[in-house]
Image: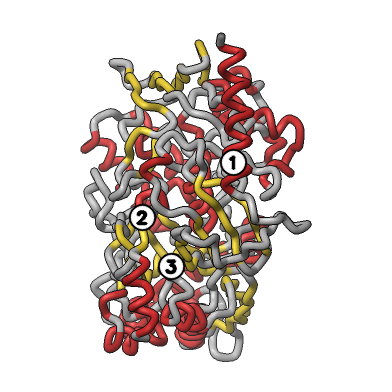
Amino acid sequence: MVIHRVFGLKFIGLAVLALAVSGCGQNQNGSSSAGTSGEPGEMVFHRGNGAEPDTLDPHLAQGNWESHIIGDLILGLTTEGPNGEAIPGAAESWDISDDGLTWTFHLREHVWSDGVPVTADDFVYAFRRILNPATASNYAWYLYQVRNAEAVNSGDMPGTELGVEAPDDKTFVVHLANPAPYLAEYLTHQTTFPVPRHIIEELGNAWSRPDNYVSNGAYVLTEWVPNDHITAVKNPLFYDAENVAIDRVIYYPTTDYVAALQRFRAGELDIQSVLPSVRIDWIRDNIPETIDLKPILTVEYLTINFAHELLSDVRVREALSLALDRETIVNRIVRMGNPPAYSIVPPTIANYPRNSRLDFVDLPQPERVARAQRLMVEAGYGPENQLEIGLAVRSASADARRIPAAIQQMWREIYVDAEINQSDAAVFYNLLQEGDFDVGIAGWVADFNDASNFLELIRTGNGNNYGQYSNPEFDALLDRAAAEQDLEARGELLAQAEAIALRDHALLPQSFGVNRAMVHTYLDGWATNVNDHVRARWLSVDEAARAEAIRNR
């Protein structure tokens, strides 16, 4: 009975999926002839998504522009609900041991988009895959909450020693190194998602091409035209397909925010992930109803390469931070209501005392500059002997140019000659990962609502610790906090760690985030949340209102 049911479902699923994407003839890159217009009668969602993805493999992706797509395609043990809250996903329920170290997940009956059942073994395989050193995932550290994960990732233990098991097809057990009361939210992140073992073992990394991609979420990848658009269609085998309204999602790379604004006004984009600050006054005057500037758990910061001999001097790093006029950046350049950042952890984070800040926060900017000049002179620099460094910047949009240009001018006052080096997202993050930079402008959107997610960025050996900051005292406090079950005591330990990182100027916090999206009012269900993840399965488009909005532009 089981074998008959499984194979019958598989072949029925393939037939239904074929009908769902019929008429979309595939080109050599997996693109469809339907393009971005959709089929007659379809509800289509056009999403301006920021950068061009480097990958849609959940174990290799790093950017939120990639996770926006992956989260529509693949369903983790938990997932984001309509308001961004963690809700059951591939697991319909779970049990937690009294000591908080063992979580037992009970999987719902559901299948991959080719009809093959999703089993607990898919999760065991996925957790071992991302931690396998051969996978070379920069996000492998995220799973270090799991028992033996770090040892497996370093190659000191085989994957079979990882603290995960599948007692049967529908039961997945996770053994943690330390209690993690936030695990349900933690598991909404793509690094914990399942992957189709039966496809990967046949195709390797080519599994994530559009013509090979198999998913268990609300949508199926059908098309990827590089630097133009990515298409996903509604998955007819998704367990909750009857409640998914949008038939087709088109994701566009939109790093030129001014051009994206024009497409948004023309109705070519239903949302645009980042509005252009250079046009904020026009937007406020003409289409204020589309602005979405709610706080999100984000920090914009400058990462400092500690391998650079000249930047290893803490006096230089402190001077760079002092001269960074955060108020001018947020109030005169960005003008979106972003708070200036004098700490690493955002002020709205949960279970955190928020008592660690840079010690010069109350100094007027002229006094900060004077102090920075004194530090630079002590370090051997002056008007006739300037520090020459590179400033790495992502993309070449108008917004991307204005902030680095301002920073460049601010640093000239303290005898620093910074050369701005621009590159697209994929190249930029490769440079950071490889340590091929002096200073880079980076940002971090929380994976889950906890201060540790920001502080782990600069832990020794973390794949996203671009500057290679390392302080054993800082790392030890993170370890102590991870083992602490009392939330108040844990928060105090994390605050002590943050104070050390700020003292060392491990990175230079610039500003905290707001969601800078533009959202048409005819898009129903859009609810900004602190993690900045809104899944397409919860949305719908009022087509009559869209047509009316386009006519009135």
Residue 453 position in % (x across, y down): 40, 46
Residue 264 position in % (x across, y down): 44, 77
Q: Nearer the viewer, mark 3 or mark 2?
A: 2
Q: Secondary structure at mark 3?
A: loop
Amino acid found under the numbered disc labelled 2: Leu
In this view, 448 is above or below 175: below
Q: Which mark is residue 539?
A: 2
Q: Secondary structure at mark 1?
A: helix
Quadrant containing the C terminus in the rendered view: bottom left
Q: Is residue 30 left or right of residue 465?
A: right
Residue 274 position in % (x across, y down): 43, 71
In this view, 71 is above or below 34: above
Residue placed farthest to the front in the image? 40
Q: Nearer the viewer, mark 3 or mark 1?
A: 1
Q: Of label 3 and label 2, which has the lower sequence position?
A: 3
In the image shown, does 440 or 506 lie closer to the viewer? 440
Q: CA distance from mark 1 to mark 2?
A: 22 Å
Amino acid found under the numbered disc labelled 3: Ser
Residue displayed at 24% across by 35% down: 487
Q: Of label 1 and label 2, which has the lower sequence position?
A: 1
- The image quadrant that residue 357 belongs to is bottom left
Q: Which mark is residue 458?
A: none
Residue displayed at 22% across by 49% down: 353
- The residue at which mark 3 appears reads as 273
Residue displayed at 65% across by 29% down: 197
In this view, 2 is above or below 469: above
- The residue at which mark 1 appears reads as 17
Does any portion of residue 51 appear in the rendered image? yes
